Amino acid sequence: MKDSMDILVISEQTDDKSPTRLTLELLGLGRRLAAENNGRVGAVVLGEGADIASRELAERGADLVYFLDNPALSRYNPEVWATLLESLLRRNPASLMLAGHTSLGQDLLPRLAFSLGAGLVTDCVEIRWDGSFLFTKPVYGGNAVAGIKVLTPLALATVRARVGEALPPSSPGGELIPIDQDPPQETRLTVKDRHYLEAGECPLEEARVVVSGGRGMGGEEGFEVLRELARLLGGAVGASRPPVDAGWVPSTCQVGITGKVVAPALYVAVAISGSSQHLSGMGDSGKIVAINKDPEAYIFKVSDYGVVGDWREVLPAFLSKLRELASA
Amino acid sequence: MGLHIVVLAKMVPDPEGPPSSFEVRSEEKRVAVRGLPPVINPFDENALEAAIRIKERAGGSITLLSLGRNLSRAVILKAVAAGADASVLVEEDSLDQALLDSRSTAVLLAAALRTLEPFDLVLCGRQASDTNAGVVGLGVAQLLGLPAVTLAQKVEVADGRVMVERVLSDGYEVVECPLPALVTVSGEVGDLRYPSLQAIRAAKELPQRIVRLQDLEISLPIEAWVETVSLAPPRRERSCRMVEADTPAEAGERLAQLLWEDKVV
Ligand SMILES: Cc1cc2nc3c(=O)[nH]c(=O)nc-3n(C[C@H](O)[C@H](O)[C@H](O)COP(=O)(O)OP(=O)(O)OC[C@H]3O[C@@H](n4cnc5c(N)ncnc54)[C@H](O)[C@@H]3O)c2cc1C
């Protein structure tokens, strides 16, 4: 077993300092890949109260967890993170480093790629081992899927939600290793205030049912109907990009290649044409239902159930029938 | 002495084209695009829009920098006419975008940017719509030693600093750094304005420089860090059960019934 076979996962934590679900999934993915090449899986946790997430990660698949608990790390600063990770990787060479395809991962890994001279594949939907790592990702807005190999000794990848599977807790957990380095004090970037947008009643990524509207909803009022339907089905409201651009819904609702990636058990697409950019964010949903007034709309080709018609006529009848069935 | 802003603009096949216009040729590991005009990568257009807004407030000039082969002059002209002052094209037959990885592209653009110094701000899209990678901007910054902020929904410049609202999954944060700097721009910034016919005519007179690889003292190939080994069409089509009925309302009811019976709801 060579040290250079090691896989390192960059942890992100929620506001209550526990690892995000995506972090746990990456650890599961790392475990699976490591099992195939007899390597070890490590995690890195940077943050204020990093010990909390570290303990959990040690029980959820990490052989070792490097952590640095420091108040200066309460907020992601790209240059601080890049400096700490670069020196960690120089001290502990790895063959693969994984991060979520999040605002942090998308920002951090390209920096590390160029400071370490390492190949990077972003937005991976699959990673396999066949003697070397094979990364799969959508290109051309989802109109094609590329298989990519990294030619440098260290490979970096940002990975989407649901590619890996979180592991149940097990004991004894992995080893906790404090990082013996202070965060750099001087950085060129200053990260100031953070603003939260109002989230829907239920976060999109976790929802079992997602009801999304497109350009054809025509305005904010249309989304009121979708909210009603989402409440009835116990789901969340999403959107294609035009409603976000038009300001009908907050940008946190956008589903697609530059929005959120969701895979609920049921996805209802209303007045959405089915662009590849949108499909790339919901194509793995369990069942897909499309309501669209254009019988030729591409969305029907990728759906399990389809209704041709104006949502203004279809939805009210759909809603009342659902209520009737539910109360019967 | 206003600001000098450079906007990186990649030419791509129109990403809004219908799926049928993207033919995946697996043996060639290439996507053949049929009947789609080239456009500036939409996120680079957002970056240009951000640059124009900064120029309107702070004054200065904008240089559009594009790299590739057979760059459409009409597309460049229209972008320049929206509010740039000059264009620089790194153009060579050997610059096949499909064969350049992010690293090679960043090396070439960084070298081209050095010939454009001094500049205060480099803006580019958060990612290209063909590769969907989002690596080149930060690579350029790293190679030039510039501080960089990504995923901007708003960019402002004051007192030698740039202030960026950076998009997060649940909101945004404000990040600042000194100039010169590089910022990657997200769609939230807003669409690039349309140039007037008058502006398009005037833009024909603006300076345009063609740069060759030998001017940059770079020879190809640049060592790539990644390699595409396969290309396949997406697996996404399903067999769709179309709900038939006399009226849309009836179809709505039937859909509910059907989903209920199939235990989907
Ligand atoms: C780089 C890039 C990234 C992008 N990222 C994303 C992304 O992350 N997510 C995303 O969604 N898009 C994204 N897009 C945009 C994408 O290309 C499409 O433009 C967009 O998804 C189209 O949204 P739509 O289906 O709502 O609108 P349209 O394509 O305009 O479709 C509207 C549909 O509504 C139907 N309709 C209209 N009125 C009614 C009615 N009364 N009843 C029933 N049906 C009706 C029409 O028949 C039509 O099919 C991106 C584009 C680019 C270039």
Image: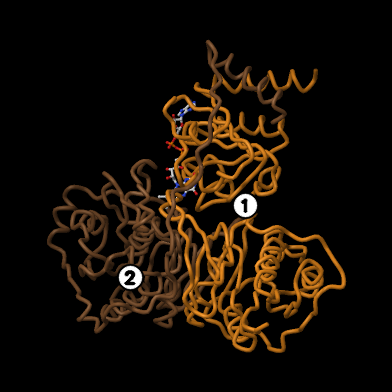
Chain colours: A orange, B brown
Quadrant position of ligand 1 = top left
Residue B146 locus on image (x, y percent): 43, 79
Question: Label 2 is placed on what type of residue?
Answer: Ile
Tell me the residue that label 1 is attached to. Answer: A197
The chain that hosts pointer 1 is A
- Give the alpha-carbon distance from disc 2 to disc 1, as whole Å: 31 Å
CA neighbours of label 1 inside 10 A, class few (<14), some (14 to 19), many (20+): some
Residues at marks 2 and 1 touching, judged by CB atoms closer than 8 Å:
no
CA neighbours of label 2 inside 10 A, class few (<14), some (14 to 19), many (20+): many
Q: Which mark is residue A167?
A: none
Q: Nearer the viewer, residue A314 or A242?
A: A314
Do the residues indicated by labels 2 and 1 lie within the same chain of the protein?
Answer: no
Q: Nearer the viewer, residue A103 or A160?
A: A160
Q: Residue at (74%, 18%) from the top-left corner?
A: A324
Q: Nearer the viewer, residue B174 or B100?
A: B100
The chain that hosts pointer 2 is B
Secondary structure of residue under mark 1: loop
Q: Quadrant of residue A284?
A: top right
Residue A291 locus on image (x, y percent): 53, 27
Q: Residue at (51%, 82%) from the top-left corner?
A: A116
In-image side of A195 versus A280 (left or right)? right
Q: Which mark is residue B5?
A: 2
Residue A159 locus on image (x, y percent): 58, 62
In-image side of A87 versus B184 (left or right)? right
Which quadrant is home to the N terminus of chain B? bottom left
In-image side of B239 versus A71 (left or right)? left
Residue A152 visible in this rendered orientation of the protein: yes
